[in-house]
Amino acid sequence: MQRIKTALSATASLALSLFCAGPLALFLMQPATAQPGDQIIYLDQGWSQAEREMYYQISQGSSVISYDIFKNLEVAASQDLFRSDANSDRYGLIPQPANPRTNPDALPIGLSKTVIAQGRWKGESIGMTCAACHNAQLNYQGKRIRIDGGAGNTFDMMAYVNALDDALQATLADTAKFDRLSARLGASSPNAKAELRKRFESDAERVHYYRSRTLITPTAWGPARIDAIASIVNRLTANEPGIPENWSTPFAPTKPPFLWNAPQGSWTQWRGTQQDPIQRNLTETMGVFMPLDLRAKTPDEGLFDSNAAILNLQQIEHALERLAPPKWPEDVLGKIDRNKALQGKALFGTHCASCHNAWPYTWTEPNKLGKRFVEVGLVPQEYVGTDPAQFEILRPFVITGQLSGQLPPPYQGKEAVPTGVLYEVLQKRILAKAMTQVKLTDAEAIDLHGYREFPLPPAPRHVYKAAPRDGVWATPPFLHNGAVPNLYEMLIPAKERTKKFYIGREFDPVKVGLDTSGKSGTFLLDTSLPGNSNAGHSFENGPRGNGVIGPLLTDAQRWAIVEYLKSIPEEAGRVTPFGGAPNARSGHGKWAGP
């Protein structure tokens, strides 16, 4: 039985965490914005409290606006502070009490202070971290279950950025608002106010440009979903180089994938396109306000400069190597029917295991560095039949402009190239230049790249990742685009799934998903809109392929599989060995098929 401890206050809980920070700790604590009786439950995911605190607040190099302005900015329609716990919670960020070690200003999970000590971007700013989107909280009957490294099921990034832009624009337009901001920052003289306004205008322009260029789309994403691919590609190929014609519409939002077992996996990203962890993590930061230069004429003049926090990203990746999938807390969500789960395990082996690897996993053969990786199923989109928008959103070609001379043969000097070519070259050049600043030994560089073997294999095309399902119970909504509200509906014919539902914040432990009634969340997800399809991954009678992946199941079979998925991992705090155990069983190296 897992131990649960309840703290009477945020201060007491913080002190208690210092004693319960070992890998087997599970405890409750009361957040700053909690109502009486609300509790936060931390599951045993292999992390110490120190690792958790680091992950929540460490800077990735993102720089949104000046830190002092963010701390004192008012929301657009009132004098309430934008950074308040109430406003953070409104947009799905998870508030926290102050922590003198890593979070003295009580920022919500996923926001951090970025300090740039020198150079053109010198200063202190507020930035986003991976925890903003890759951390979750499941609410159930007044309890809040923290899922570290989970799919951020509440954060509405698009709405948050839009609200930040509204707040900045309102302050520019409203003299009283700006005067109150000036007073809070001690800018009382005319010269001080003029300097503050100049800095404020620069910050406001950056956010407004991001909102009106990077994020503009006809389909609102809503909570738990982000079109990271188009947003990053737009920033690298259109916005930062100043070539607006290269813009692609970000209408293919996906939910942030969970991160346990990601460093150990053979492939990451929903499309199975990444292996190198530092390239993956730095590219993510490029999409969320990392300062970078794609307009200088040459690298000597600053082209490809960035605020890449290489060593911080490595620290995050090392922590993720030690992150365990969360075990279902029976004392909170209800007992698991072990007999039913055993039946579900057999059914999973028959109908699901050809795509989804299961513990103790099938591993790749050791590479030349002696490391194995967990085989991740890569299933053709035309077989699984789920929404194809990820493969359709990007324009096929882009203008190279002033960057044409920086491309390798045979693209060097070309005025237009495939979008993927320019995007890949730019991200690699930014990474390469950042690497020159950190002076790593050969061994350290191998570690930074996750012990991957170079040259990397070509990324597969038009496939979706089918990773192991351990801990999947904690990651609603489901499918890559979050278009299915619970696990039960993942096992029925696609045509019978809910076509419109509210993305709620209350957890449903029966069907294992989110409340869809509108009582705990008011964003209505319409699966008929582009990028929102809930087709595919269908269990129905008929030939396999074109979206049909298994036979029509009986209701008893569906509930048995759901019970099995609740039961894995079977052991709390079970961390997958990075690089593979010596006796790991070797796999086939590709999708096994139906």
Image: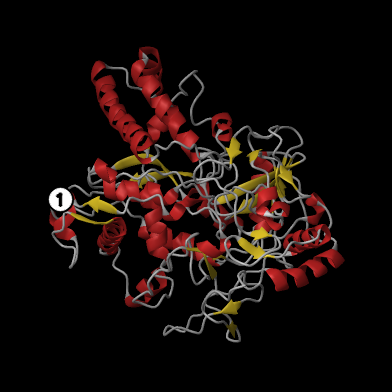
For the point 67% across and 68% down, which residue is it? 352
Vertical order, 400 against 166 (above or below): below
Q: Quadrant of the C terminus?
A: bottom right
Name the quarter where the N terminus is drawn: bottom right
Q: Residue at x 60, y 52 (%)?
A: 535
Q: Report x, y in % for residue 274.
A: 43, 65
Its colouring scheme is secondary structure
Q: Position of residue 260 (x, y in %)?
A: 58, 62
Query: Which x, y percent locates residue 67?
Result: 39, 36
The one of 462 and 31 positioned closer to us in this rendering: 462
Task: Please state the horizontal and vertical placement of residue 183, each as a whole percent of the image.
Answer: 38, 19
Please state if 427 lies on the left or on the right of 336 as rendered. left
- Name the outermost residue toward the front: 542
Q: Is residue 513 visible?
A: yes
Q: Which residue occupies the foreground of this view, 584 or 233?
A: 233
Would residue 299 be seen by someone viewing this image from the given angle? no
Q: Secondary structure at mark 1?
A: helix
Give the farthest residue toward the top.
Answer: 176
Horizontal arrangement in the rendering, residue 513 relative to residue 95 (left or right): right
Name the amino acid type tagged 1.
Answer: Gln
**Callout 1 crowding tier (Cα within 10 Å): few <14, some 14–19, many ≥20:** some
Q: Pointer 1: what residue?
A: 402
- Figure quadrant of residue 552: bottom right
Q: Foreground residue, 79 or 518?
A: 518
Residue 204 image-quadrant placement: top left
Residue drawn at (52%, 70%) of the image: 265
How many numbered tags mark residues here? Answer: 1
Q: Is residue 10 above or below residue 294?
A: above
